[in-house]
Each structure stands twice: as C-alpha cells, then as structure tokens.
Amino acid sequence: MFHGRVREVVSPEREENSENELSDKNDSVFLYLHRSHLCALEASQCSRSLRICILSKNFIVDMSPLQICTELIKLDLHSNQIRIVPDKKFWGEMKKLKLLYLHDNSFVKLKNMCSLSACPNLIALTLYDCPVSLKKGYRRVMVNSIWSLKILDRYVISDEEVIENFMLPERFKALNKRLFCDITPKVIK
C-alpha cells in the first residue's frame, strides 16, 4: 500500500478521483515516500510509468523491485541500508535515468558499482558517505566506467579525471571548489 504523496496522470473519465489517491498505478509518475519507515519494496508498489521516485531516509535493503520502473528519470534512495547494487541488466533497462542518489548507503565493493555503467544516460550520481567512496581510485574508476556521467558526488567531473596524466590549472582540477555543484535535493517540511 502506498503511504505518501503520489501524483498521477489522470484520464478525463477518472477526474473525480482525488489527486493523492492512486486508483490505477499504471498512470503514476511521481512517488514520494521520504522517511516513511519502509523496510522493503514490493513489485506491486512500483509502476512501469513512474518518472520520479523518492524513497530516501528509509530502511530499504533491496532495490530490485524497481526493475519494472523503466521510465525513471530521477531515483533517490539515499540514506537507506542498501548493500548490493543490481547487475548491468537492471541498469541497462533504465534508459531514461539521469539522476541517481545513492549516498549514505552501505556499498562496499567498488567492482560491483561498475554495473552502473550500463545505465546509458546517467549524468549525476551520488555515492559519498558510502564505504565504497573511501576506496583508493574510487572517483577514477567511477568516472571512467560511466561515460555519460557529468557530476559525481556533487562535483563536476574534470577532464583531469578522465584523461590519465593530464594536468590542468588549479581552478579546473578535480574536486576544486569551483566545480562544486550540489545536486542533492533539500527536503522542505
């Protein structure tokens, strides 16, 4: 059962339904379940036409039920308890996904994170405050695995990170404060 704000595209014959009522989940485009104390997702909660999904600050450990949400543009799963990233097949189906917030989770293996490279249009990714972000060479591996990526962990990717042994002036170097771009959403109560 959905507990949160849901915006749906309403056909004229269903206009009498309230905006927060999900009468046909195939029409849902927005799901907001921030701090809803969710422990697990079920496939029945997910919609094929879902475009924006915000499931931050819950207790979710498995994101695989989202595999049917192939129309996602933005997925926010930060501050959950996820340890395993789905495989390349999962991410390969997410052809429209552009923004992925996974920071403050329990990812440990850098090798597993490379499955995100199958996501063809991913432009922004957050993994800071995860154990994997402390691994040696983390940024270089992520930047060179996900070719479409423009922003990693709130910093625009520098050419210096892409091209090995390429030296730039200080203002264009990786992680320079001028390249800071906070793409993480601010939740307003």
Image: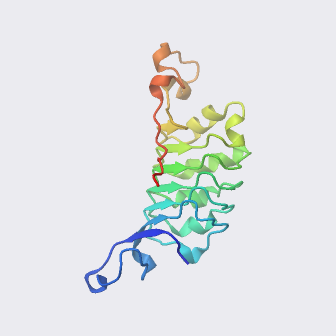
Q: Residue lying furthest front in this view? A: 189
Quick check: 102 above or below 174?
below
Q: Residue lying furthest left in this view? A: 12
Quick check: 142 above or below 92?
above
Residue 127 vs residue 83: left or right?
left
Q: Residue 177: image x %, image y %? A: 49, 24
Quick check: 113 above or below 164?
below
**Which of these two is toward me, 175 or 48?**
175
Would you identify the image quadrant in which residue 65 lies? bottom right
Q: Residue 2: image x %, image y %? A: 53, 74
Task: Count numbered badges in the picture.
Answer: 0
Residue 79 vs residue 31: left or right?
right
**Which of these two is toward me, 135 or 131?**
131
Q: Which residue is rendered at x = 70% and y = 35% of the image?
A: 134
Q: Which residue is rendered at x = 50% and y = 67% of the image?
A: 69
**Which of these two is toward me, 93 or 176?**
176
Q: Residue 135: image x %, image y %? A: 72, 35
Residue 38 vs residue 71: left or right?
right
**Which of these two is toward me, 180 or 108?**
180
> Quadrant of the image for the N terminus?
bottom right
Q: Residue lying furthest top in this view? A: 169
Colouring of the image = rainbow
Quick check: 184 above or below 75?
above
Q: Which residue is rendered at x = 63% and y = 36% of the image?
A: 141
Q: Residue 5: image x %, image y %? A: 45, 68
